[in-house]
Image (spheres, rainbow, N blue to C red):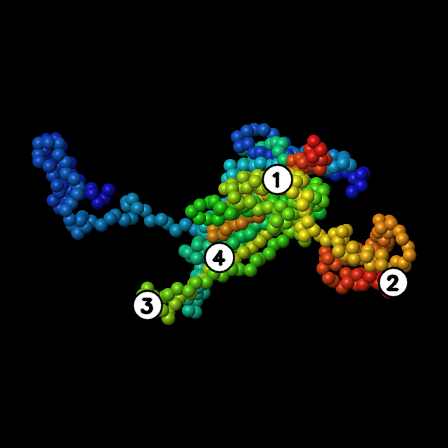
Amino acid sequence: MTASMRIASVRLLSKTRHYFSSEVAVQPGARTVHHQPASTRFVFTSVRCNVCLIPVAFLHKGRAYGTQSSSVTVTEEPDLLFQKLSVLVKSHDKAVLDSYEFFATLAAKELGLTLAKVFEPPKNIERLTLLKSVHIFKKHRVQYEMRTHYRCIEISRITGSTSRVYLEYIQRNLPEGVAMEVTKTAIEKVPDHIQMPLWSVQSQEKQGSQ
Amino acid sequence: MAIYQDSIRVQDCFGTLHKRAGPSPPAVSFPVGRAAYSLGLTASNGVERQGLPERGNQGQRRQRRAVEPRTERMTVDQDWTAVYPTAASFKPNSVPLPVRMGYPVKRGVPPAKKGNLELIKIPNFLHLTPEAIKKHCEALKPFCTEWPAALDSDAKCEEHFPIQVESKAYVSAGPSLRNPNARIITLTVKLSSLNLDEHARKKLIRLSGERYNKDTDTLTITTDSCPMKQQNYDYAMYLLTVLYHESWKTEAWEKEKTRADMEEYVWEDSPSQKNILETLLRMRPLGEKEEEGEVREELLGRVEVQEYKDSVTKLKNEGETETNMQQYKEAVKKLLNI
């Protein structure tokens, strides 16, 4: 990176939806900051949303819903950054998972997320053998099995607010008989109290000489 | 109500009975003189009840007329999101598709959609057509924030944000929403990104024990001792802080570190150095009497001796490989003028 390069430090500001307020929607301002040779500062602020207050049935009704007072306000709070978001869905029915995968991938594309990997981990079959009869007849058994199919959708480089929106949308539309496991890998800076040692070599020498 | 109309009779306070509608079974009645009434409860039911329940126009239970299904009135370019805005079960009269589902009987076809339980049982995605998904996403876009453009590669993320915190969340149906595995936090950090000197780095590696991976130079701290996720995260950060600051401290007993405790092989003051110096001293022609210290310094400063030192250190630290052995051979040959 040369000194002449501008690094756009996107100031992502927190957005809260007020259900019954009549404030005008405030868009987040993306400020460009000149490159500082010492360090580049990234300030990210989060987006909070209460989508649960608005029933999904109203989402398709554009104008009728828009007249209801709802706004996106921006507040200051550092936003989380996720290097990877892995969504693993499990079900007994493979067809349901196929449809769900189509839905989740299309939703991710529409929201502008980068899909790193979409794959199908091998299925897991749990079998058990039981006696067929209530009493005696040991030679006659019955076998049952439980098949668990998996599907994994990995999204890379997503912010905390977007992940919250995406996950809530995905989870609300989770079909019957499907379970989900979400693995989030957040990235953070080294906190201030670990930057400099409390007991450095010089101070110890001073203590030793005293 | 048709059943009781002919059974209920009311007596006024003077005890005069009104005329009965028709022959009916004997009913319970109270003695005359009081405001008496008879209940419609009869001893025997059904057989002697007059008439059948009324049908047709006068009956309060009307027959539902078969209305044409909604699918007949649907156009090809209709707004499907209005038909299925939310998740709902399959309604054959609302879905204009000739779907068939089920196991066919002999020489038959799968049953049609009308009254088909198999179609109702399965989860359907009729409310999540691509058009509906796009509409939903359009509405959700104002709440999303963009990923900063400057962090477009993993290397840059690592450089500016070295600590990685991994956590899991679970969604499933059951008696409880909570999953105890959701409290586990895994914190990963590369030691190269922390402010450590040589002694601090070695001490930190010793303190962390199994949590340090030498190949990738990462320290992994997994916490699950607290009941809440936030508590486990705080505990993990606390452990990292403590490890860091403790590794900078030098205790009094650390001076007693012996050769056996060293993590790496150090050539200075080792038997190898003593041997080579002795050998080289003996190789010198007799008669030259010089200071011991000066001779040693001079010998150590020679290029061949340095090469020999490098090869021995490599052999001891990295193990015996082809290249290492070759290097050792060359160094020895040069030293002893073979």
Q: Is residue A33 left or right of residue A85?
A: right
Q: Is residue B99 left or right of residue A2?
A: left
Which residue bears the numbered disc 1?
Answer: B242
Which residue bears the numbered disc 4?
Answer: A92
- In percent of the image, x 60 and y 36: which residue is there? A47
The amino acid on which the numbered mark 4 sits, given as a three-letter code, is His
Q: Is A25 or B27 nearer to us in this picture?
A: A25
Q: Nearer the viewer, mark 3 or mark 4?
A: 3
Q: Chain of mark 1?
A: B
Which residue bears the numbered disc 3?
Answer: A136
Q: Are marks 3 and 1 on the same chain?
A: no
The amino acid on which the numbered mark 2 sits, given as a three-letter code, is Asn
Which residue bears the numbered disc 2?
Answer: B337
Secondary element at image label 2:
loop
The amino acid on which the numbered mark 1 sits, given as a three-letter code, is Val
Residue A131, image quadrant: bottom left
Local packing at callout 4 (Cα closer than 10 Å; few below 14, some 14-19, many 20+) is: some
Q: Is residue B273 left or right of residue A123?
A: right
Residue that protrudes farthest toward the top in the picture: A22
Local packing at callout 1 (Cα closer than 10 Å; few below 14, some 14-19, many 20+) is: few
Q: Is B313 or B91 nearer to us in this picture?
A: B313
**At which x and y percent is residue A128?**
43, 63
Secondary element at image label 4:
loop
Does residue B261 sit above or below A77 in this rendering? below
- In percent of the image, x 43 and y 51: which residue is there? B68
